[in-house]
Amino acid sequence: MNDEYTDNKIETKAADSSSGSYAPPAEKIPAQEAPDQELYHAKSFWTKWVFCQDAKVIGIQYALTATAIGMIGLILSWGMRLQLGFPETFSFLGPATYYQSVTMHGMIMVIYLLTALFLGGFGNYLIPLMVGARDMVFPYVNMVSYWMFLVAVLVLIASFFVPGGPTGAGWTLYPPQAILPGTPGSEMGIVLMLVSLSLFVIGFTMGGLNYVITILQSRTRGMTLMRMPLTIWGIFTATVLALLAFPALFVACIMMTLDNLLGTSFFMPEIFTMGEKLDYAGGSPILFQHLFWFFGHPEVYIVALPAFGIVSDLISVHARKNVFGYRMMVWAIVIIGALSFIVWAHHMYVSGMNPWFGFFFATTTLIIAVPTAIKVYNWVLTLWRGNIHLTIPMLFSLGFIVTFVNGGITGLFLGNVIIDVPLSDTYFVVAHFHMVMGIAPLMVVFGAIYHWYPLITGRHLNQTLGKIHFWVTFVGAYAIYFPMHYLGFIGVPRRYFEMYDSPYMTSGVGLNQFITVAALIVGFTQFLFLYNIFTSWYKGEKSERNPWKANSLEWHTPDYPPTHGNFGKELPVVYRWPYDFSVPGSDKEYIPQHVAPSEVPTAKAEQT
Amino acid sequence: MFVAIIFALIIVGSIIFHFWSPWWWTPVASNWGNIDDTIILTFWVTGAVFVAVCLFMAYCVWAYRYRPDRKAEYKPEDKKLEFRLTWLTALGVVALLAPGLVVWNKYITVPENALKIEVVAYQWGWNYRLPGDDGILGKTSVGLINDDNPYGLDSNDPNSKDDILVMDADLHLKINQPVKIELRSLDVLHNFYIPQFRAKMDTLPGIITYYWFTPEKKGEYEILCAEYCGTGHYAMRGFVKVDEEQEYSDWLAKQISFEKMLAKNKLEKNLLIAEKN
Amino acid sequence: MSQFDITKLPKGSKGFMHDWGSDQRAFKGVPWGKAMMWIFLLSDTFIFSCFLISLMTARASTVVPWPYPSEVFGLTVFGTSVPLLLIAIMTFVLITSSGTMAIAVKYGYEKNRKLCGWFLLATAIGGLTFVGMQAFEWSKLIFHDGVRPWGNPFGAEQFGAFFFMVTGFHGTHVSIGVIFLFIFARKVFRGDFDTGRRGYFTSMKSDYEAIEILGLYWHFVDLVWVFIFAFFYLW
Ligand code: HEA
Ligand code: HEA
Ligand code: CUA
Ligand SMILES: [Cu+2]
């Protein structure tokens, strides 16, 4: 390497005296700690595009697979909505098919769409680029991770075609019903679901280890943890959560598979059903619920934290202003992640567990609102006194804030244990989690796609279609889920195939029809978006390099769009955080991360 | 401009919808009016924050929209502001949580004079059992269930003889009489939920769970199963009737006790055998 | 290129702060593979914890008496029943294999090809013995004592279910370890780590660090066994 970096002494003293943080002194960047990563160079079409070890290609593979299965999830939701809105007109769905649709819809959306898209898709594409690495640390394992995911998806799809159909146990898969004949898909469907989930966990672990180690151990020179874009912080924390939460799901899957296939009684108590006593005895259904939610609650933050991170970056770039309170934002992400492991039983307030747990879990649950609230404040304070470009990514970010705050606040209702009693298992819960998980993070996904599409393809998405996509999706989805809360207040339980003429439900009929129509419109708009993605790939307006004038490394690669190895001959050296927009004293409107202080001598940027 | 207005309109629309919506909870018919109060309190606190945050956002979008001559402020952090906001939020959390926990404490503390009633859930319906004059419910076990003994009652337990069994019929409750609902399931998870009473709890096979309430309004209320329990989940309904003192005693007098049911079953069986012979 | 010198870094908690606040690496001087193995083991710890905590709750809540380990796991030698004999030998073998593994790692760092390879082989054989004895124990429990995952003659049926599941899961870990030990022994004897021969699948070079990483895994599997041992045989 260059001679100017041969000084390998680390100036702890200087850093010490300034702010207590150990950021390396501005101009002096320590020597490279390890030799450059050796990369596998593809030799054939197969190793280049199919069994590819380049994280960028793997990311796209993940994203496309997740989107494909996500479309199935979306179409399933139409079937459900048609049944709920017009129960007399569309009788092609029987109750069994309905419950299978609900189950597959929930599972696909949470695990196979959002988790895979955020971590597998955006994680793979962005992590190496944003931290200044050539690739993931173990490209081969990373490739296997994608193929495991694909197999998991195929097994899931296969369950649609086995006798009895896919499982209809609800995405929570609660035993004993999940494996008893009173539930649709209790023959092969449930087994394939459990196998698919286990494969997903194994595949994810391979990928997740890569993401974590790449971020911890493979950053470029000058890229301290506190100079990483919040996108990376979000994905990093979410991955750690996943590595620690998925084991509980994995164990639950194994135990339930054994209960089903071998007749063990881990989760199965004595049961009398269909006129006979079953061979099970002594198991505990609540144990499954604990295992499931020990995974399940962190899981919802696994899909929320990357969204938090990405949206921070989108807001900052498109408002031309630094993220307000970066340090607090990082700590908030980490604290939310840590707390998410001690709130799981708020899903079990009325499950029959010891009622005294209610006090503890209500308290921890509401405490999470504090770091989350800080994030919300900081997003709107980033807009304050910014110079806001109302680009499509910015629109989606604004939509995210509204829907997330709305959904988060209804979470506070549910978290307060006594309020959860009447509302649990009603449409209030359905509205809560669609607002906070179905809509809010998806808004970020869409915003992120509009934001990074030029980087990936070198072309812009069509702006007019984009605006239509945003307004219909945002207003439409809000119109679906805001009124849905009130169905919950009436008392309508979730997972009801039909309400019949229940005395107090008649007033909700019109509302249900309205929701269905809105859902269909919003759903069709997504196909418009897909059309936009595919046509813009080769017809879209050509994008110049760094069209949004962003600072983070991914926009500053020597080749645009970035190629294998990401950074050409030499890795970049980082001197600042990625949020130096509108720095006083500087004539530049933005200062990318790799610009040395000596190149912008007049800038009064705070040292980070 | 346009964008900011639409966002503001969505917020205003939400408020209007909230206050003028025809969809709201059914009037409470038990002592759990406190739950409604906590919900209302939560609405005010969180609603205020929601409106404030979102309107502030809309204002920013309008006031700081892109102008080529505008330069955004450079301000990485403001410790004092963040500190204040954190504490304000913490205060909000306490305001929500404290009353909630007080009511929860009430919810899990069953009064002494509560009448114990057992609800037996199965795929897909409800049965009930009331203690006889002794006020004690006899022991049960899944292993003992058969055609003659659908509840699996232990006939050796002296407390079980006078237990009153209400099968495939509506449950009646006496007005203003606190009841402790003891929940039992024969097969899978269910949840005994009556929206007007606000209370609910899962039933589990192998475990007895409970909750309590005092019905305070005469009338007929629909029972909904609120935990997914298989294909018939949505059809698992039933009715509870809240009666005045007199009606209730009349109803109770017509119910059959375990002992009588055993005798009746035996008689029928003997008759059947006699017929065959 | 100038070399980075990890010996010059601050020590103690200050050092920790420094490392995490610095650039490039949070764990200074720790190779990627090793860091990855540590994190993986952390994740794996959660798996075994979930298993064992489930076992604890099942055992605490069962109404049927839990079988006595000394009765179930006794072995009759020359007419007298010795409790926990087999299991003691198994544990001894596994712990010993941890020792040979540690020696293999040491010789690996000394680039002593021969000895490293032999000790790896010894470790593999230790692991294989362990798995073999476990298979013997399983077949004794199944065919002789009539213990099944769905029931057993000694008491609570969860006993058999948890026993087979948890020891089976651990045995799978050991077996995977044994396979890798054999592969690595072969690599060492062939001198792959000295010549920088590329891996068959990954087509990447590797060196003796790989032995240490495998060692981490092996020690972890042993440590887990200690817990399983305590939970099933001593409790
Ligand atoms: C991305 C996913 C996501 C996220 C982020 C959240 C966030 C939260 N969730 Fe939600 N939740 C789900 C996904 C998610 N949830 C899902 C999928 C289910 C159902 C699963 C099923 O049963 O199928 C569920 C169910 C669920 C339940 C169980 C309901 C039941 O089944 O009975 C509860 C109960 O406590 C709950 C609470 C919360 C809380 C307190 C938060 C908090 O983190 C929210 C914090 C955010 C805010 C509070 C908003 C911002 C704050 C401010 C603007 C400041 C104002 C604050 C104050 C005045 C204090 N959620
Ligand atoms: C991220 C999660 C997610 C998403 C996006 C959705 C989207 C939708 N969901 Fe669903 N839903 C769940 C997660 C999700 N859902 C879960 C976990 C359950 C619980 C299951 C259970 O009870 O077991 C559930 C249950 C559920 C129910 C309750 C059924 C019942 O209890 O009986 C209903 C009813 O209306 C419903 C409707 C819809 C509708 C109309 C849509 C949408 O159609 C809304 C409109 C569409 C969008 C806002 C955009 C959709 C975009 C994509 C699908 C991605 C495309 C991606 C790219 C192009 C990159 N869902
Ligand atoms: Cu019974 Cu749902
Ligand atoms: Cu949760």
Image (cartoon, helix red, strand yellow):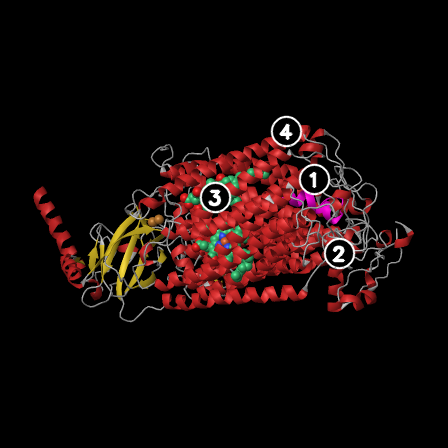
Q: Is mark 3 on a helix, strand or loop?
A: helix
Q: Mark 3, chain letter?
A: A
* Of residues B11 and A179, the one drawn nearer to the viewer in this rendering: B11
Q: Which residue has dot 3 on it?
A: A479
Q: Are marks 1 and 3 in contact (CB under 8 Å)?
A: no
Q: Where is residue A421 in the image (x, y as percent from the top left)?
A: 39, 58
* Of residues A214 and B87, the one drawn nearer to the viewer in this rendering: B87
Q: What element carries label 4?
A: helix
In the image, are marks 4 and 2 on the same chain? yes
Stretch in magenta = A120-136
| Residue A562 sits in quarter | top right
Q: What residue type is labelled 1?
A: Lys
Q: Mark 4, chain letter?
A: A
Sooner in the amino-acid sequence: mark 3 or mark 4: 3
Q: Which residue has dot 1 on it?
A: A56
Q: Which residue has dot 4 on it?
A: A535
How many angstroms separate mark 1 from mark 3 (CA)?
36 Å
Q: In this view, does A169 lie above or below B144?
A: above
Question: Measuring 19% from the left and 61% from the top, which residue is drawn there?
Answer: B244
Sooner in the amino-acid sequence: mark 4 or mark 2: 2
Sooner in the amino-acid sequence: mark 2 or mark 3: 2
Q: Are marks 1 and 2 in contact (CB under 8 Å)?
A: no
Question: Measuring 40% from the left and 51% from the top, which residue is drawn there?
Answer: B20
In the image, are marks 2 and 3 on the same chain? yes
Sooner in the amino-acid sequence: mark 4 or mark 1: 1
Q: Could you classify mark 4 by the number of other residues whose Cα lies within 10 Å: few (under 14), some (14-19), or many (20 or more)?
A: few
